[in-house]
Image (tube, rainbow, N blue to C red):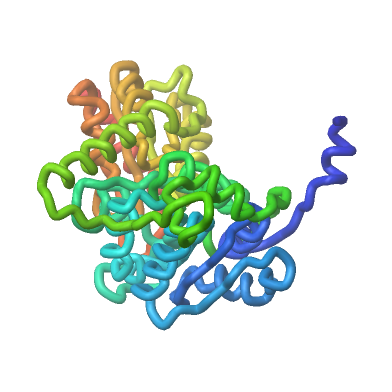
């Protein structure tokens, strides 16, 4: 197909990141959304209510009485083999942690969107990246992980919603789209994904062998639980999950590189910080400093191998985050002491500027290589 014809068939819209998630959820065949309003992600549910997908695709959209209720509704729908999702922001996701752990323990696929805001506590409605630990390290109790996608554009808010469902069902695990308030609220051009039909009951039976669909003539009912009364059974579940996580680490790592081929120094950042740091790289290059940017797209699985290789090739690394220093721990583990890793972060909802990142790069990373 030539470019002009392809462009004619694409649906291009101008919308917020939150709105893009809502449109993508409908189009990828989501069966049910259950949520509770909280800034800065409320437009997800508001857009779904406005679009009324129950009249077009049959998708259920329900405002629950709380975040705890919404995650347990997701659990119930996922247990039936349905594509279910929820969204919230940082304090709301904290309330969901028990339910997320239950979903992981029951090996149920679902999608959770977290549009991060500043904390701790009620914090601020301004953007943050301080939920990295809460998400990538599991958050709730037990030895589980979540596939975590970190969009850096409105387009990726749509694309990652579709991808999150695909990965969740491929590996039978909760999957998170971890954005920040800037990406959720900003407006950009987005190409919406094509419509996918919702799964039929026959497809659910074939694709989702765990699904509890009630007793039928052809199959016995399944019982879904994360409870194991015998320690040996609980260990078997954990071993199965850990094997699955290793498979995810092997097959699903995603990252993006900017000007890394000849870089003497490397910046590692995700989400909004990566957008800022891309400008920093351009400014540094204009000053004759060879700087590259590596943007993790999957925070779990983390691009450990790629960062480790740059640790052996570069003179210094700077991680930039909107928190007190969380992803930096994984960057330091990746390079394993091969190179010095510095950190720069802003908190309280403040987004670092490209100028200040460049100044930090010069003062903390580049100068230190000559000491």
Q: Nearer the viewer, residue 342 or 304?
A: 304
Q: Residue at x 23, y 43 (%)?
A: 237
* Image height of 327 relative to 188, above or below: above
Give percent across and percent down for residue 25: 60, 58
285 lies above or below 200: above
Residue at 60% in and 55% down = 201
Q: Is residue 349 visible?
A: yes
In this view, 119 is above or below 215: below
Drawn side of residue 309 relative to residue 163, left or right: left
The residue closer to the viewer here, 327 or 317, is: 327
Residue lying farthest to the front in this orientation: 217
For the point 63% across and 54% down, the residue is 200
Using the rendered view, name the quadrant where residue 129 is placed. Answer: bottom left
Give the residue at the far bottom of this rendering: 65
Residue 33 spot, x, y in % from top left = 53, 67
- 335 or 86: which is nearer to us? 86
The answer to whether any part of residue 355 appears in the image is: no
Q: Position of residue 100 (x, y in %)?
A: 32, 59
Q: Position of residue 87 (x, y in %)?
A: 46, 65
Please identify the quadrant where the N terminus is shown: top right
Please identify the residue farthest to the left as the structure is shown. Answer: 231
Give the total number of marks visible in the rendering: 0
| Residue that appears at 47% across and 77% down | 37
Q: Quadrant of the C terminus?
A: top left
Q: Is residue 368 above or below residue 120?
A: above
Residue 72 as seen in the image, left or right of residue 209: left
Locate residue 143 relative to residue 220 in the image: left or right: left
């Amino acid at each position: 197909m030539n470019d002009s014809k392809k462009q004619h068939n694409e649906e291009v819209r101008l919308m917020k990141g939150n709105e893009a998630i809502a449109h993508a959820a409908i189009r990828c065949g989501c069966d049910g959304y259950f949520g509770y309003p909280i800034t800065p992600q409320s437009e997800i549910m508001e857009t779904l209510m406005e679009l009324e997908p129950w009249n077009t695709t049959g998708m259920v959209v329900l405002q629950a009485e709380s975040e705890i209720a919404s995650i347990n509704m997701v659990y119930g729908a996922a247990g039936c083999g349905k594509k279910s999702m929820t969204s919230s922001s940082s304090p709301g996701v904290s309330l969901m942690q028990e339910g997320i752990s239950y979903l992981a323990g029951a090996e149920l696929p679902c999608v959770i969107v977290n549009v991060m805001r500043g904390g701790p506590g009620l914090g601020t409605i301004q953007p943050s990246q301080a939920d990295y630990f809460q998400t990538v390290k599991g958050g709730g109790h037990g030895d589980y992980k979540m596939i975590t996608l970190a969009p850096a554009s409105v387009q990726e808010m749509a694309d990652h919603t579709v991808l999150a469902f695909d990965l969740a069902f491929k590996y039978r695990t909760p999957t998170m789209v971890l954005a920040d308030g800037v990406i959720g609220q900003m407006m950009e051009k987005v190409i919406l994904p094509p419509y996918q039909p919702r799964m039929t009951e026959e497809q659910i039976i074939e694709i989702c062998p765990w699904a509890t669909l009630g007793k039928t003539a052809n199959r016995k009912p399944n019982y879904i639980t994360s409870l194991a009364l015998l320690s040996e059974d609980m260990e078997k579940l954990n071993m199965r999950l850990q094997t699955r996580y290793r498979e995810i680490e092997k097959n699903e790592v995603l990252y993006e590189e900017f000007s890394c081929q000849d870089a003497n120094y490397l910046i590692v950042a995700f989400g909004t910080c990566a957008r800022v740091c891309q400008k920093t790289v351009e400014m540094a290059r204009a000053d004759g400093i060879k700087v590259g940017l590596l943007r993790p797209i999957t925070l779990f699985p983390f691009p450990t191998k790629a960062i480790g290789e740059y640790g052996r090739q570069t003179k210094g690394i700077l991680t930039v985050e909107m928190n007190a220093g969380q992803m930096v721990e994984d960057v330091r583990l990746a390079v394993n002491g091969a190179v010095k890793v510095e950190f720069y972060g802003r908190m309280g909802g403040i987004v670092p500027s490209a100028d200040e990142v460049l100044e930090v790069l010069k003062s903390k990373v580049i100068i230190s290589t000559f000491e």
